[in-house]
Image: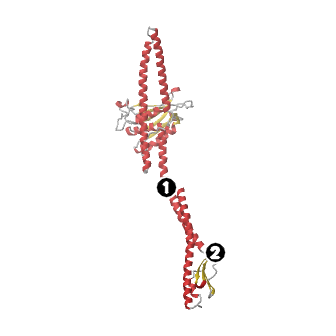
Amino acid sequence: MIAVAITGLVLGAPLAFAYWRLAEHTTRADLLARLAQVVVRLDDQRSLDPSAGLGSIARVLPPGGRLVVDSPLTGRSVIGPDPGPGAVAESLALGQGGTVRLAVPGGTWGDQLQTVALVALLVGLSVGIGAAIATVTAWRLAGPLEDLADRATRLGMGDFRPAPARHGIPELDRVAELLDASAAALAELIARERDLVGDVSHQLRSRLTALLLRLDELATHPDPDTAAEAEAALEQAERLGAVLDDLLRATEEARAATAEPVELGELLGEVVADWKPQADADRRPLRLRVADELVARVTPGRLREALGVLIDNALRHGAGVVTLSARWTGVGPDRMVVVEVTDGGEGVPEDLAAHVFDRGISGASSTGVGLALARALVEADGGRLELSSARPARFAVYLRVPRGEELPGPARPSTSVVR
């Protein structure tokens, strides 16, 4: 809009000045044309009758114009009223040293002002139309850009859900497609990282445990030197186990660096609101039961993504009412928050129950990646995802409680909220 306004001023100001000068120039050109006619008539009359008057010249004059003829032969002759101050006048030479002067009232100011006002109106109209187009264009771009910014923010927070909506702007749609591709790549990377850490941890612990058992047996050897060496090696192996535990704990804490204390009632309400249209379209009730004052340490984007996978599975493969519930579980240092997703379908087949979180395992035509990704996201914040019941299907997400916070007691059934 600023650019349009500047363009209007840069073009409008010279144009107004040009029309201002053009109005005055037009008036003077008209006076000169009339003076030329007067000179011709005077020359014709005097060639026929030198004593002829100026009566026939009056009709050539403009309204309110005043003609002054200075001739060495006839002296000064005046026709018409006084044009007053600010008159516009032009003069031409007359034969034998005379002059003819024609003056009209200064009415060109009004014409000039009208012309300038018309130019200003046209410039203002152009600026207004440009501003309207700029506003519409800005609104058309602002919405998609805000959506892309939100999508990038959710991606940085660990929310890897694809955004299928497109905006009809090729460049922005291309960015949205790249964000979706990046989200899929990051989700796969997290799953591979979790699998790698789990496999490495399992293999190292297994080998280390076997080594500790062998060294422990060797420490009972009757040879004192051999027993002492075994004791020293056993001590080093135990230190290696402690270092391994510290490294794994540091890895978990690094992955959970974005986790923060979150009030789950509001967060789970947003998850239900996101999936309510899909549930309504499938004619499936979606309910929420949340105990009062539930607080867990999570990354909101990761938890939304994981719960989204579970709700999507319940809508795709389950039946009946889909329920999202949250409550306290455990006591003392083992206290956690458990979030459960259940439905009234036939549940998970027995042959798949033990492998439902394995990548590529699916009981339908899906890719079998969703549950593996959901578990990786939950574990990234230090929680865990389990299939607590196969028939009916009940998935439980166990979340850590923030350290050092005053937490409310276990919720009674009467305190839960149904939505």
* Structural distance between the alpha carbons of marks 2 and 1: 49 Å
Q: Are the residues at dot 2 and dot 1 in contact (C-beta closer than 8 Å)?
A: no
Residue under pointer 1: 136
Q: Which of 190 and 231 is in front in this view?
A: 231
Q: Where is residue 375 in the image (x, y as percent from the top left)?
A: 43, 33
Q: Nearer the viewer, residue 75 or 405?
A: 75
Which amino acid, by three-letter code, is at mark 2? Gly
Count of labels in the image: 2
Dot placed on the residue nearer the N-terminal end, 2 or 1: 2
Res. 210 in view: yes
Instruction: Judge whether 153 appears above or below 381 on screen.
Output: below
Instruction: Judge whether 6 appears above or below 358 on screen.
Output: below
Q: Residue at x 59, y 85 (%)?
A: 96
Res. 328 in view: no
Q: Position of residue 346 (x, y in %)?
A: 37, 35
Q: Position of residue 245 (x, y in %)?
A: 48, 24
Circle 1 Cα neighbour tier, 10 Å, few/some/many (<14 / 14–19 / ≥20): few
Which amino acid, by three-letter code, is at mark 1? Val
Residue under pointer 2: 86
In this picture, residue 367 sits left or right of residue 261: left
Q: Which residue is drawn at 54% across and 61% down?
A: 10
Task: Nearest to the eye among marks 2 and 1: give it.
Answer: 2
Label disc, if present, on residue 20 of the rendered structure? none
Instruction: Judge whether 35 appears above or below 183 on screen.
Output: below
- SS label for mark 1: helix
Q: Which residue is drawn at 43% across and 51% down?
A: 169
- SS label for mark 2: loop
Q: Which of 139 and 11 is in front in this view?
A: 11
Circle 2 Cα neighbour tier, 10 Å, few/some/many (<14 / 14–19 / ≥20): few
